[in-house]
Every structure is written in C-alpha cells, then in structure tokens.
Image (cartoon, coloured by chain):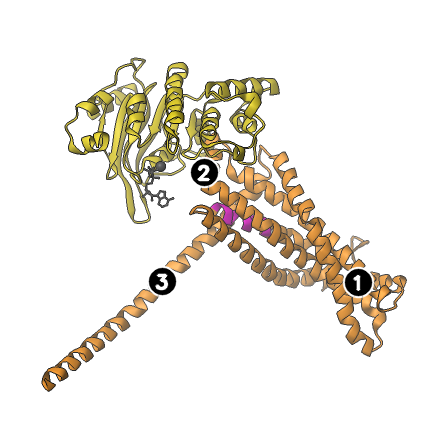
Chain colours: A yellow, B orange
C-alpha cells in the first residue's frame, strides 16, 4: 500500500509545501474522477492527493465543481468514473455501514452552515457526539463548551438560541464547532468566508489557522477568495474546465507565469 | 412585376409545403420523445417512492430507533390535527342528518337516521375525511419541512454526521402517522355520530335513545369480528393505516425530491397534498373492494 502511494506521488510530480513535514501519508486521493449532471460534464478527470496534515485549497470560478469535489469525498455524490480513496480505502463502492465509519472521521462545514433549524445551538453542536458516542451529559456539555470556545462563541449566551436567531457569521462558526466537536482527522470547508464582511472573514481565517496548528487536521478548503486561499493553504489547486489546471504552493502561485493563474489571482 | 410576384408566392408556397412536410416528419418523433421522457420520469419516480417506503418500513425494526422524534411527530399529527378533525366531524355529522332527514321524512323513515349517519361515518366519511384533512395539514407540513432541510443542505449535513436521513426523518413520521391517523379516525367517527345526534334531537324531534339505537343496530347488523368488534368498525380502522402510510410517505417523498430553493419547497408542498389526496381516494376504492370480500362475503 505504502509503495503504491509513493508511486502515485512521484508520478504526479507533487511538491510538498513548507510547514507540513509530518509523515507523508496520502489521506485523500482522487484518481481520474469524472462526473456529469444530465448532459453537462462538471468534472472531467480530477487527480489530487491530499497528504496528512496539509491544507489543500481548491479555487476556481463559480460553477467549476468545487462543492462537487467535497461532496464526492463524502460520497454524497458518486462519480461516474475514477477512484476516491480516503485513508487508504476506496469509498465509491463501500456499503452504507462502511461509509459511515469513514464519515465519522470527517467534519464538514457547509457553504450556508446547514445548521439543524429545529435544534438549539447546543444541540446542533452536541449532535455528532450523541450520534457516535455514548457520553454522559456532563461530558457532552464539556465538549460542546470547548468546541464553541474554539470558535470564539459564548456558550452561556448562545447555547440556547435557535439558528434563526444567529447572524450569518455566528451560524458559520457554530457550523465549524459542529464539524470539529468530535475531533475529526479530516476537515472539509465549503466557502468558509463567502458572504461575510472582511472583519468576520478575517476572524474565520485566523480560526482555521489555529485549528490547523492545534488539531493537526488535514483540510480541504473550497473558496474563491484568493487572499483567504494564500493565507491558509499548504497547496492551492486551481479548477478549470473540469480539471485541475494548476497545483502548487502559494509561493509557486506568486511566481507562476501562467496567464490564467495570474488573471485569477492578481486580476 | 407580375411574374416576380407569382414567383414569390410560389416560392412561399413551396417553402410552406416543405416546412409542413418536415413538421409532419418531426411531429411523431418529437411527440414520442416527449412521451418517452415523461414516462421514464414517472416510472423512475414510482420506483423511488416504493424504494423509500421499503426503507422506511425496514428501519422501524433496525437500531437506532428515534423515539423522541417519533413522539414529537405523534404530537404534531395527533394533537395538531385534533381541532380540524373535531370541527370536520361535527359539521359532517350534522349536515348528514339534516340532508337525509329531508328525504326520509317523506317516507316516514326518520327513525332510521341513526343508522344512516352511523354507517356513513364509520365506513367511509370517518377514514376518508380524517385522512384528507391530515394530508392537507400534516402531509404538506412534512413536505415543506423536509424540503427546506433539503435545499439548505441539512439533509446532507445529517448524512455526513453519519445519520441515516430515512431512519431519522421518514420512519418517525411514518410510525407516527400509522398510529395517529387511526386514532383521529375514531375521534372523527364519534364526533360525527354526536353531530348527527345533535340535529336529530334538537331539530328533528327524535329521542337520543332512538337515534343511538339506530347507530348500534347498523354496526351490529353486519356481524362481529372476534365476537365483539363490529365488522364495520374493523373495516373503518384498517383503512386509516393505509392512508396514514400514504400521507407520511408522500409528504416525505416530495420533501426529499425538492430542489431549487424556496420556490421548490412550495411546489413540493402542493404536489404532496394533491398526490396524497388522489392516492387516498383511489386506495379507498380498492380497499373497500378487498375488505367487502374478506369481511362480508
Ligand atoms: N444536483 C445538481 N443537479 C444538476 N446540476 C448540478 C447539481 N449540483 C451542481 N450542479 C452543477 O454542477 C456545476 C458545479 O457545481 P458546484 O456546486 O460544484 O460549483 P462550485 O464550484 O461550488 O460553484 P460556487 O463557487 O458557485 O459554489 C454547476 O454548473 C452546477 O449548476
Ligand atoms: Mg459551491
């Protein structure tokens, strides 16, 4: 297994970014992934390896298929062709029970937070704990409190509120708390800063940076904000016409002379 | 000039003829394509409906069972629909007594009003009206709630956390409907009979005793199951089980099918109520046929 992973790495000619020296295990691998909706080909062959403890940021124009890639990693969508490997196991043909086990190791932050609107903030964040672990109520509360602290939210003030009573930025942060409360190994973010003001957006970027340092998670972050991308990325993957048109460190992006990359990043 | 004009017209005629021929050739093809696509979509939809129903029923017997959600749905369906069921039942019973009294008076058959109201309420109006009211009130709510969860990615979020959305969202609604629709039907039956009693005593000058004896006679007349359950009551209680399943499954199916934002939620809601009502009425016919064969022949 290790040998074949190494081979694909060499074959793909992947360069690692700085600051992610840990062991170089591939945690998520997409191989030749293609997907069409009706007649439109959205993805036409995506190859991407995500190493343990790195953060790959996927950028690209609206409708390029960025959210689709995250959904494929979670098997909310099954690709027409290609392989999806998470922690060394192919997931596209797994049974329901097997995929549940994989999903438990992943936390996902949705584009619009996707909080359960009939549950309080507390119950939203506690939900993954209640689903996966048999914990005493005291332990649940301690973990929820801790997760909310991590995203700078006041447990005592917001715990009892319903999602409808929160601002957009607060919702997103509750969404992040829900995604990290069971301490997953992999975190997926869909547009963590979209539709937020610059200040809130900056706090969320800081938050992601702190999570990277503190939880040592592997991340895939989708965004079309290039400033966010260069601040949190180990590597940046650029999606265009259903393929990854560019893959490299933020430094390599700055040095790139590819006209489309320059257009996308520097206007 | 003239020749030119002629030419022009001839040309137009020829073009028109050619277009018509082309249309004729294309027409059946295009029509067939349309019919074909529509049929395929229908067959697929029906198949998905039954797959969802199968999964929801199987999940009743598999862990985990979401008790709290089920109780909450029982509250939504049962307590939530009690008001309209009481009102519908009362007025239906009253109008039934009033309408039939006009004809029956002519034949001096007023004493049979209890029989008529009792039989109609327990056999048909109770189960069907209750189910139609619940479909309009609760089935639409299910479609709207699951639909908005779908378009705001809450169902994806559940799936990602490792919850089976069918087990968590559909099965509790199905179980709650299977329990509560028959209960509401019994309430509707009783209230409709009381509504008839009200009119018989206050307006038609019958005694309560005479009216209620009529109700009892009509129920006892067709015989009993297991010695004490009137066959009419049994048949009137088998139906709402099926109708309850139809209401829950139709609401949930259209909820899950929702796409396209809040507008999509509105469309799903309407479709759920329309289809559930049609299915209830059609199923009622076939169930009656089957029950008559089993119980009464
Ligand atoms: N369920 C679906 N049915 C049909 N088409 C879909 C569906 N989901 C996505 N698409 C289409 O697939 C394409 C990619 O969608 P996706 O959501 O992945 O884009 P995106 O890169 O995340 O865009 P954005 O930056 O706007 O969020 C779009 O053209 C979209 O219209
Ligand atoms: Mg997107």
- Give the residue at mark 3: B34
Where does the magenta region start and end? B247-256
Q: Chain of mark 3?
A: B
Q: Which image quadrant: the C terminus of chain A?
A: top left
Q: Earlier in the sequence, mark 2 or mark 1?
A: 2
Q: Chain of mark 2?
A: B
Q: Earlier in the sequence, mark 3 or mark 2?
A: 3
Q: Is residue B63 left or right of residue B201?
A: left
Q: Quadrant of residue B284?
A: bottom right
- Crowding around mark 3 (Cα neighbors within 10 Å: few <14, some 14 to 19, many 20+) is few
Judge by depth and name the residue closer to the eye, B149 or B211. Answer: B149
Judge by depth and name the residue closer to the eye, B296 or A43. Answer: A43
- Give the residue at mark 1: B196
Marks 2/1 in contact by CB < 8 Å: the verdict is no
Marks 1/3 in contact by CB < 8 Å: the verdict is no
- Give the residue at mark 2: B153
Instruction: Judge if badges 2 and 1 mark residues of a common chain.
Output: yes
Q: Is residue A77 left or right of residue B193?
A: left
Q: Quadrant of residue B227?
A: bottom right
């Amino acid at each position: 297994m290790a040998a074949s992973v190494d081979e694909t790495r060499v074959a793909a000619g992947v360069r690692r970014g700085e600051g992610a020296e840990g062991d170089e295990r591939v945690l998520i691998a997409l191989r030749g992934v293609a997907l069409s909706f009706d007649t439109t080909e959205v993805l036409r062959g995506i190859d991407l390896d995500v190493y343990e403890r790195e953060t790959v940021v996927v950028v690209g124009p609206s409708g390029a298929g960025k959210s689709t890639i995250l959904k494929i990693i979670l098997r909310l969508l099954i690709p027409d062709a290609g392989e999806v490997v998470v922690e060394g196991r192919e997931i596209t043909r797994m049974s329901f029970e097997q995929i549940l086990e994989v999903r438990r190791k992943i936390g996902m932050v949705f584009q619009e937070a996707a909080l359960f609107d009939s549950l309080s903030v507390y119950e939203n964040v506690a939900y993954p704990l209640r689903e996966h672990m048999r914990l005493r109520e005291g332990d649940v509360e301690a973990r929820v409190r801790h997760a909310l602290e991590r995203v700078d939210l006041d447990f005592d003030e917001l715990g009892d509120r319903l999602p409808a009573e929160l601002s957009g930025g607060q919702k997103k942060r509750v969404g992040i708390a829900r995604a990290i409360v069971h301490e997953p190994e992999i975190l997926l973010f869909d547009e963590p800063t979209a539709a937020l003001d610059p200040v809130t957006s900056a706090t969320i970027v800081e938050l992601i940076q702190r999570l990277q340092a503190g939880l040592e998670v592997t991340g895939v972050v989708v965004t079309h904000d290039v400033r966010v991308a260069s601040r949190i990325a180990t590597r940046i993957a650029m999606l265009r016409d259903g393929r990854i048109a560019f893959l490299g460190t933020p430094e390599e992006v700055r040095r790139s002379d590819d006209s489309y990359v320059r257009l996308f990043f520097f206007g | 000039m003239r020749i030119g004009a002629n030419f022009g017209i001839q040309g137009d005629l020829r073009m028109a003829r050619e277009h018509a021929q082309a249309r004729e050739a294309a027409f059946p093809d295009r029509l067939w394509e349309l019919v074909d696509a529509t049929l395929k979509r229908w067959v697929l939809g029906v198949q998905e409906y039954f797959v969802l129903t199968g999964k929801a029923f199987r999940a009743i017997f598999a862990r985990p069972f979401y008790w709290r959600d089920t109780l909450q749905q029982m509250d939504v369906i049962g307590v939530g629909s009690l008001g309209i069921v009481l009102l519908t039942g009362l007025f239906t019973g009253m109008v039934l007594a009033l309408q039939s009294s006009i004809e029956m008076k002519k034949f001096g058959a007023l004493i049979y009003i209890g029989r008529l109201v009792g039989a109609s309420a327990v056999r048909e109006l109770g189960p069907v009206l209750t189910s139609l009211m619940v479909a309009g009130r609760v089935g639409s709510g299910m479609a709207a709630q699951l639909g908005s969860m779908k378009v705001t990615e809450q169902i994806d979020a559940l799936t990602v956390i490792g919850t089976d959305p069918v087990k968590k969202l559909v099965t509790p609604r199905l179980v709650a409907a299977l329990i509560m629709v028959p209960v509401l039907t019994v309430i509707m039956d009783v209230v409709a009979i009381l509504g008839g009693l009200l009119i018989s005593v206050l307006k038609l000058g019958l005694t309560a005793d005479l009216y209620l004896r009529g109700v009892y006679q009509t129920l006892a007349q067709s015989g009993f199951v297991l010695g004490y359950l009137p066959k009419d009551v049994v048949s009137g209680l088998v139906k709402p089980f099926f109708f309850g399943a139809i209401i829950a499954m139709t609401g949930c199916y259209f909820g899950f099918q929702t796409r396209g934002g809040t507008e999509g939620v509105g469309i799903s809601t309407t479709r759920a109520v329309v289809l559930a009502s049609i299915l209830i009425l059609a199923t009622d016919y076939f169930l009656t046929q089957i029950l008559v064969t089993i119980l009464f022949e």
